Image (cartoon, rainbow, N blue to C red):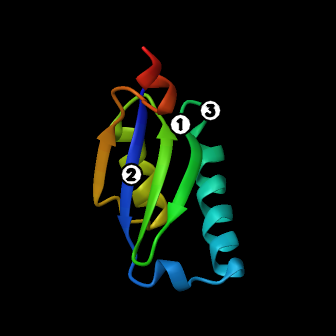
């Protein structure tokens, strides 16, 4: 199943409190549960003004539906084509 990186522009994201992040996470998980097991949230990275999320999903359509239902921005959605890391250099 394809993996995607979603860029969410959220001004002040890095200043969100642990409680606010928990509330956002709970809302996201609740919507995902309603949508079924095909779309999965893997992890997210919070920066100063953006949140980058990693999802597994059959297509962008489901990611956009999740964003719309949750009121979350999905400013950019990119399919991951491959993953590299330090071991890639070992050939």
Location of residue 43 with respect to 12 vertically, above or below = above
Element type at marker 1?
loop
Residue drawn at x 59%, y 53% is 31
Pick the front one: 64 or 88: 88
Location of residue 78 with respect to 50 vertically, above or below = above
Left or right of residue 6: residue 78? left
Location of residue 86 with respect to 26 vertically, above or below = above
> Mark 2 or mark 3, which is nearer to you?
2
Verify CB contact (< 8 Å) between mark 1 and mark 3. Answer: yes
Verify CB contact (< 8 Å) between mark 1 and mark 2. Answer: no
Identify the disc placed on residue 39.
1
Residue drawn at x 65%, y 54% is 29
Q: Please give the count of numbered marks on the rendered protein.
A: 3
Verify CB contact (< 8 Å) between mark 2 and mark 3. Answer: no
Place of residue 30 in the rendered image (x, y in percent of width and height, measured from the top left): 66, 55
Identify the disc placed on residue 6.
2
Mark 2 surroundings: few (<14), some (14-19) or many (≥20) residues within 10 A:
many
Left or right of residue 23: residue 70? left
Q: Residue furthest front?
A: 90
Quadrant for the C terminus, please.
top left
Element type at marker 2?
strand
């Amino acid at each position: 199943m394809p993996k995607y990186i979603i860029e969410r522009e959220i001004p002040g994201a890095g200043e969100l409190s642990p409680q606010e992040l928990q509330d956002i996470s709970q809302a996201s998980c609740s919507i995902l549960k309603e949508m079924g097991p095909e779309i999965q949230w893997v992890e997210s990275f919070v920066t100063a003004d953006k949140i980058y999320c990693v999802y597994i999903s059959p297509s962008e359509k489901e990611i956009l539906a999740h964003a719309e239902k949750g009121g979350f921005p999905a400013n950019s959605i990119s399919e991951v084509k491959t993953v590299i890391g330090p071991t890639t250099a070992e050939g």
